[in-house]
Image: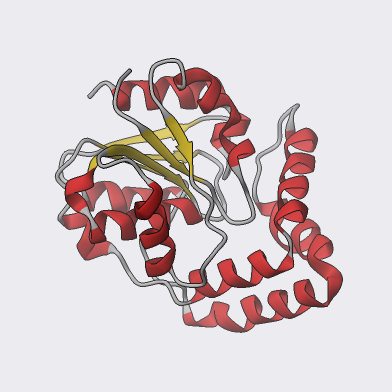
C-alpha cells in the first residue's frame, strides 16, 4: 500500500462527497475521511484531525476542508507529505459576512436548516449539468444528517478563520490547487492566489464543474488527483 490519504469534506458534507475518490484510490492508498463536526474553530478542528491521522499522510481538503488542511499544515508541516486544496479560500472571512452567517445560524437552530441550505447555500454550489439535481439531493441529505448544531459550529469556525497566506508561502511538499471552472463560492482568482503562494504548486481547473468537482466531474478530478499522488 502507498501512503495514506486523508480527505477533509466541505461544510455540511461527509464522506459521500468523496465517494468517487474513495472508490478510485482505496485499492492503493489507505483512505481516511475525517469529520469536521466536533469544534467551532479551525485550530481545534485541525488538532482533532491530526489526533486521528496516520503519522505521515497525503492531505486533500475541499472548501471548508481545504481551510482546515491549511491549518493542519501550519500546525504539523512535517506530518503532511503532499497537499491538495480544492475549491477553497486562504483568506479570512470578509467582515461583511458575519451578519449573514449569524442569521443563517439562527434560522438553522430554529428548525429551518433545510431552507437555509436549499435557498441560500446549495444553489451556488453547482454548475448546470445532467447530474445537478441528484448531487443537490445528496448535498441536502448530508446536511440534514449532520444537523443544525454542526451547522452552527462550522459557521463559527468559518467566520473566525485566520488568513493562511503566510502558511502557504512556507509549504514545501508537492501541492495541487484545484477548482471547478464555474465555482462561484471560491472563484478561480482565489486559486490563482494560492497557486502563486505555494512554490512549485500545480493549478488545475476542472471544466464542467462548480464548487464540487469531486462529484460533478469525478473522472477528471480523479485523474488530476492521481497525478498529484504520484508526484
Coordinates of residue 49 in the picture (x, y in percent)? 41, 53
- Residue 6, relative to residue 48: is it above or below? above
137 or 45, nearer to the observer: 45
Q: Is residue 190 visible?
A: no
- Residue 120, relative to residue 53: is it above or below? below
Q: Is residue 166 visible?
A: yes
Location of residue 208 by image quarter: top right
- Specify how the rendered protein is coloured: secondary structure
Query: From the viewer's perspective, is 221 left or right of 115?
Result: left
222 or 24, nearer to the observer: 24
Residue beneath the point at 79% across and 65% down:
113
Residue beneath the point at 47% across and 52% down:
65
Location of residue 15 by image quarter: top right
Location of residue 116 by image quarter: bottom right
Coordinates of residue 186 in the picture (x, y in percent)? 49, 54
Residue beneath the point at 66% across and 66% down:
151
Coordinates of residue 185 in the picture (x, y in percent)? 55, 55
Query: How many marks on residues?
Result: 0
Residue beneath the point at 23% across and 49% down:
196
Q: Which image quadrant: the N terminus?
A: top left
Query: From the viewer's perspective, is 33 left or right of 115?
Result: left
Q: Which image quadrant: the C terminus?
A: top left
Query: From the viewer's perspective, is 201 left or right of 212?
Result: left
Query: From the viewer's perspective, is 25 left or right of 58?
Result: right
Amino acid at each position: 500500500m502507498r501512503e495514506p490519504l486523508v480527505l477533509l469534506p466541505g461544510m455540511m458534507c461527509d464522506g459521500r462527497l468523496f465517494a468517487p475518490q474513495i472508490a478510485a484510490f482505496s485499492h492503493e492508498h489507505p483512505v481516511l475521511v475525517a469529520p469536521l463536526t466536533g469544534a467551532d474553530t479551525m485550530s481545534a478542528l485541525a488538532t482533532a484531525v491530526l489526533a486521528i491521522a496516520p503519522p505521515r499522510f497525503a492531505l486533500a481538503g475541499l472548501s471548508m476542508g481545504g481551510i482546515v488542511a491549511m491549518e493542519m499544515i501550519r500546525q504539523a508541516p512535517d506530518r503532511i507529505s503532499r497537499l491538495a486544496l480544492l475549491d477553497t479560500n486562504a483568506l479570512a472571512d470578509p467582515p461583511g459576512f458575519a451578519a449573514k452567517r449569524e442569521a443563517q445560524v439562527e434560522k438553522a437552530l430554529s428548525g429551518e436548516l433545510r431552507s437555509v441550505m436549499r435557498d441560500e447555500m446549495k444553489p451556488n454550489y453547482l454548475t448546470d449539468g445532467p447530474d445537478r439535481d441528484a448531487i443537490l439531493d445528496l448535498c441536502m441529505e448530508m446536511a440534514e444528517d449532520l444537523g443544525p448544531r454542526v451547522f452552527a459550529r462550522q459557521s463559527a469556525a468559518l467566520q473566525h478563520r485566520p488568513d493562511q497566506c503566510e502558511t502557504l508561502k512556507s509549504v514545501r511538499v508537492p501541492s495541487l490547487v484545484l477548482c471547478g471552472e464555474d465555482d462561484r463560492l471560491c472563484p478561480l482568482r482565489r486559486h490563482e492566489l494560492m497557486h502563486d503562494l505555494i512554490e512549485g504548486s500545480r493549478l488545475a481547473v476542472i471544466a464542467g464543474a462548480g464548487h464540487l468537482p469531486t462529484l460533478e466531474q469525478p473522472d477528471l478530478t480523479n485523474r488530476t488527483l492521481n497525478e498529484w499522488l504520484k508526484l
